[in-house]
Image: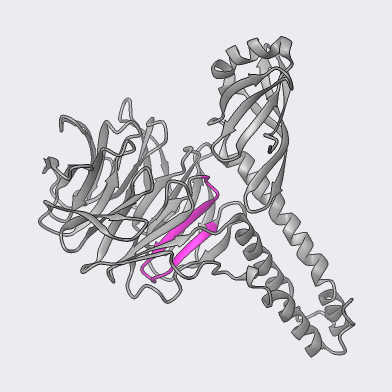
Amino acid sequence: MLKKPKNEQTVLFYLLVLIFAAPAFSMNPNEKPVLEIRSTAAILSLDYSPDGEKIVTGGQDNDLTIWNVKNGSSLMTLKGHADDVVAVKFSPNGRYIASGGVDNKLLVWDAISGDLLHKHAAHRDYVRDVAFSPDSKWVASASWDGTSMVWNVLTGEVIATLTAHLDNVTSVDFNADGSEMLTGSGDKTIRAWDTKTWMQKYMLQGHTDEVWDTHFSSNGRMVAGGAWDNKARVWDVTQRTQIHVFSAHTSDVWSVGFSPDNQLLVSGSGDRQLKVWDLATGELAADLAVDLFKAEIECVSFSPDGKFIAASSRDGFLRVFNTPSVSDRKNAYVNQKITKWSVKDPFEKTDDYQSRLRKTDRQKEEFEEEFDKKASDFFIKYSGWEKLTLGDYNADDESFAVTSPFLGKLRVVVASREAKNFKEVFNEKFKDMKIKSPRFAVKQTIELQDAELTVPEGKEFRYYYLRPEKSK
């Protein structure tokens, strides 16, 4: 039991000890990079291979370099551009690499052999960004000439040319099912295109200066943008509304990226800072590269498994950091809230202030509970359940195995008399299934404790109990 502090100075010291004594509250939980690569030229672009074992970079030396992520060794150098390489991207199937350069060219490479497959020279100004469709059949380019073009990867045929933007086109990305393509522009807008008709579906506005980067979340429910207004912004795709504005950068936001589980956003800036944002709370989760980079951070990316964040800079360094865990995010949230809560109001009596500070432990618990609720609510709304896959049925405990890429192995309880029908309708009606009343435990990860899976049956719904797989 702590003794009652004798005066306000003692109370303040007591509070500072509570807040800062525990290293778990650090805003920089993983300050040291787990991998550091030094290039002889500025590194202007990067991308992970789909298996997460390699990173390709493009630089001011006009070359692409493929790196081994485990030891930082150079595996291959690809030569073909005549000027800076400002965009690189692996295809989802891992077979190709696309690159864009200040030489106005889009190049497509064989990712295994390093052979140049196609050189596209249709753009009249430099190619700022490239992206593959999810099936790896198309590659899109965004150019400073004000157009975005879509090409057949195998034949080199032009599929579409988009000209609606009123300024340079700086970024391009496809959603997970390939039905939409994004473009960001110097006209301050982000536009989404229907990939069947190549007509504009919607436009996202909010940035007050040139948009420099834009991405879909992995399930297509959110869009992020980084711009010369020093801000990163996030929109809800369904509602077409802006849900977050992140304003901590003091210079242009050159690059943004969602974590694979859609819980975090990373941003890299001309202010040399690498920031990780918690999308559930809207708060800063971590500053990862304080005083490390000596020039602008040009490109950022999460690894495919979400465990790491890579960032490259004009200073020639590529650095890889551990991604903040859920507990890191929780500690950062509580720390920020406690720090704000502890400030004495100018109209607050000293006795009242001292009394309030003695309740710091309880207030900390309330902020922890607040984080848990926000994290759970956000997970339900934006992480999605559409990637659940149905496994085998266990007749003894009357349940199906279910696998979620974000929640791991689960069981859905289905009576044996209903099991056959459930299996038949699962794929057909899964898009109409809903998760009801989920309960989560927020630990190192967000763990589902239990929920109800609702399946439509005519005008009614049937409910099935969903729970984690029991550990053996």
How many discs appear? 0
Q: Position of residue 75 (x, y in %)?
A: 24, 54
Residue 409 shows in the view: yes
**Residue range (magenta):** 261-277
The quarter holding residue 122 reads top left
Quadrant of the frame with the N terminus: bottom right
Q: Is residue 367 above or below residue 408?
A: below
Q: Is residue 274 magenta?
A: yes
Q: Is residue 79 magenta?
A: no
Q: What residue do we see at 80% from left, 69% from top?
A: 361
Position of residue 324 in the picture relative to residue 470 (left or right): left
Residue furthest to the front in view is: 472
Residue 208 shows in the view: no
Q: Position of residue 430 (x, y in %)?
A: 58, 22
Q: Position of residue 259 (x, y in %)?
A: 48, 49
Q: Position of residue 51 (x, y in %)?
A: 38, 43
Q: What residue do we see at 67% from left, 52% from top?
A: 443
Quadrant of the frame with the C terminus: top right
The residue closer to the viewer here, 54 or 139, is 54
Position of residue 322 in the picture relative to residue 433 (left or right): left
The residue closer to the viewer here, 214 or 444, is 444
Position of residue 458 in the picture relative to residue 151 (left or right): right
Position of residue 428 in the picture relative to residue 86 (left or right): right
The quarter holding residue 318 reads bottom left
Q: What residue do we see at 71% from left, 47% from top?
A: 441
The residue closer to the viewer here, 407 or 82, is 407
Q: Is residue 150 above or below residue 415?
A: below
